[in-house]
Image (tube, helix red, strand yellow):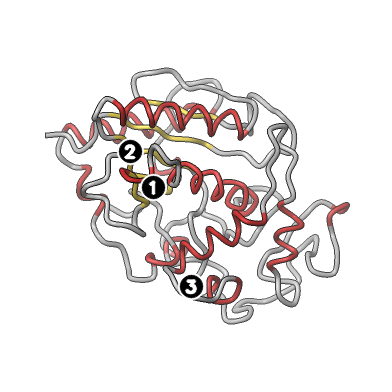
Amino acid sequence: MDLFDAYIAVDWSASSKPKRGIDSVWLCKHGSPPENPSTRDEATQLVRELLQEVAAAGKRVLVGFDFPYGYPRGFADLVAPGDGPPWRRTWNAIARRIRDEPSNANNRFDVAAHLNVDRGPFWGCPAGHAREALTLKRGISFPHKGLQEFRAIERTVRGVQSAWKLYGAGSVGSQALLGIPRVASLRDDPALAPISAVWPFEPTRQAQVVHVEIWPGVVAPTAHPIRDAGQVEALVAHWARLDQAGGLAALFKAPPSSSIEEGWIFGAVE
């Protein structure tokens, strides 16, 4: 019996303007062609509607976004000390500060500068956003304030970059700062919260909506002319095939204990 009835993957973007095509948001629900909303706001609403539709039908859905869902161990205690799970404290601290407008205009560099201590751990920005607290290039060494440069999963999987890097080729830091509040809004949506869980932070066995962090590089893309679209299309097809063959459950096996704060890329290490 399949674990899920639907599969959705989203390739994210930190663009500050509406954008389609290369280096923009692409999402795909298995069985449908990839879609290319021009803004993060539009994409989030589209995913919300898909999740609500599947959940209302009493079905189960696996949904993933391609940015880090957490940071190296210790970050939560640095920026959001207190009670509660470290991952959730981090998510709340970011979500309270990020402003991401329907036009894609956002304050991610301001937030990174605010969260930094002694010009780190976040680094990288356009020249117009540089300041004492946030440098154009990495001006610190790691460990910085007790924080490692990479999460455990990033030390395991080749080609994955650090969430501290906000700007430049291959960077994912800006996508995480702008994406975590969006996933949090879906996880906490009044219609979805009682039936949702985020892996590996929360138990998923009883959840109808299961959120996972993805890295589309785990599979070869389809022949779609836009690589990002081909990657999400290939990933949801991969999940569906694995599930049908009884192999998807193995991807939910418990990763290292550090993942309870840092997160883990779903399916990156089988």
Q: Which comes before the other along the chain, label 2 or label 1?
A: 2
Judging by the rendered image, the residue that carries numbered circle 1 is 212
Q: Quick check: 226 above or below 257?
A: above
Residue that appears at 70% across and 38% down: 101
What's the distance in space between the residues labelled 2 and 1, CA to CA? Answer: 7 Å
Identity, as a three-letter code, of the amino acid under mark 3: Arg
The dot on residue 73 is: 3
Residue that appears at 65% across and 24% down: 20
Residue 165: x %, y % from top left: 65, 58
Q: Is residue 254 left or right of residue 189?
A: left
Q: Which comes before the other along the chain, label 3 or label 1?
A: 3
Q: Is residue 114 left or right of residue 179?
A: right
Identity, as a three-letter code, of the amino acid under mark 1: Val
Q: Secondary structure at mark 2?
A: strand
Q: Nearer the viewer, residue 113 or 188?
A: 188
Picture quarter containing residue 121?
bottom right
Identity, as a three-letter code, of the amino acid under mark 2: Leu
Q: Secondary structure at mark 1?
A: strand
For label 1, count other residues whose C-alpha is less than 10 Å away and answer few (under 14), some (14-19) or many (20+).
many
Residue found farthest to the left? 1
Q: Nearer the viewer, residue 117 or 86?
A: 86
Q: Quick check: 63 above or below 268?
A: above
What's the distance in space between the residues labelled 3 and 2, CA to CA? Answer: 26 Å
Residue 45: x %, y % from top left: 53, 30
Residue 214: x %, y % from top left: 43, 45
Residue found farthest to the front? 190
Contact flag, marks 2 and 1 (Cβ < 8 Å): yes
Residue that appears at 24% across and 35% down: 4
Residue that appears at 80% across and 64% down: 135
Residue 76: x %, y % from top left: 53, 71
Judging by the rendered image, the residue that carries numbered circle 2 is 62
